[in-house]
Amino acid sequence: MYRNDRLSRVFALIVICLNIFVITVPFAIEAIRSVGISRYDLPARLNISRDGSLPEMFNYGQAALCALFLFGVWLRTREHMFLAWSLIFSFVTLDDAARFHERGGLLLAATFDLVSLPGMRARDTGEIITWSMVALGLLAPLLWSSHQSRPRQQGLGSVFLLLFACLVGFAVVVDMLHFLTGSKLVGYAEDGGEMLSIAVACCCAFILYRGLGRDADLQALDPSLPFSKRT
C-alpha cells in the first residue's frame, strides 16, 4: 500500500520527519547547555516532557488523527476490529490530554492507601491499576472482534498491536525507569518513544485508509498489482 500510493508516502515522510525534528531539537539544546557550550535555556513551550507544551499538543493531534483514520477504515469496511482500535487510540488521546492515568493513580493512592512496590511510589501502583482497568475494558472488544476477523485482517491488526505495545512500554516501563534514575536522557527516550510509536501508528492508519479505498476488499489487495487496479 505504501509503495503504490504517493500520497501515503508523502504523509508518512512528513509525519516522521516532524516527529524527529520535535524530539531532536529540544534534546540538542539541552545537550549543548549541559556541556557548557551554551547558556540558552530550553523554553518550557518546547520541552517534550512538559504538559501543554507544543510537542505535547502535536502528539495529541497525531493520536487523534490515528483514531480518526481507523474510524474511517471501519466505516468503509464495517470490520469491528478497526473500530476497537479507533477506541483504543481515542483513549490514548484522552489519556495524554487529560492525564487520565496520572490522575487515576493519585486518586487510588489517596483513597485506598496503596502500598508502594519496590523502587516505586504509591501513585505508580495506582497508575498501573488504572491502566489495567482501562485495558480490560478496551481489550475485551478488541479480542472478540479480532477473533471474528479473517487472517489478513488479523495480520493488519497485529501491526497496531505491536505499535501499541511499544507505546505502553515507553509510557509505563521507561517512565518508571525515568523516575528511578532521574536521568533527562531517559526522560527524552520515554517521551520520544511515545511520540514515535503514535506517529508510526498514525501513518499506518492513514496508509490503510488510503489502501482499502471506499469499495476495496481486504482479500483483493495483491501486492503484485498496481495500486490503481487492486479494487
Image: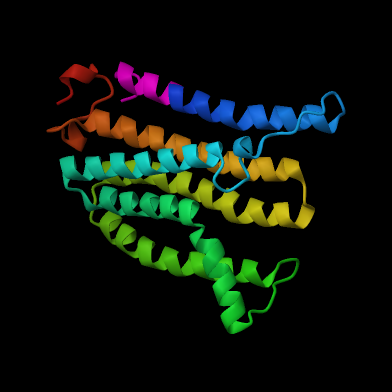
Q: How many marks?
A: 0
**Where in the figure is residue 29, as x and y percent of width and height?**
72, 28
Residue at point 61% right, 32% down? 23
Task: Please identify the dominant SS of the magenta region.
Answer: helix
| Residue 117 appears anywhere in the view | yes
Left or right: 52 in relation to 138:
right
The residue stretch that appears in magenta: 1-13
Q: Is residue 3 magenta?
A: yes
**Where in the figure is residue 80, as x and y percent of width and height?**
23, 52
| Residue 128 appears anywhere in the view | no
> Which quadrant would residue 43 be assigned to in this image?
top right
**Where in the figure is residue 147, as x and y percent of width and height?**
28, 57
Name the foreground residue: 32 vs 2: 32
Q: Quadrant of the N terminus?
A: top left
Residue at point 25% right, 29% down? 211
- The residue furthest left is 215
Name the foreground residue: 75 vs 53: 53
On screen, 76 above or below 102?
Answer: above
On screen, 112 above or below 133?
Answer: below
Residue at point 30% right, 54% down? 84
Residue at point 71% right, 44% down? 186
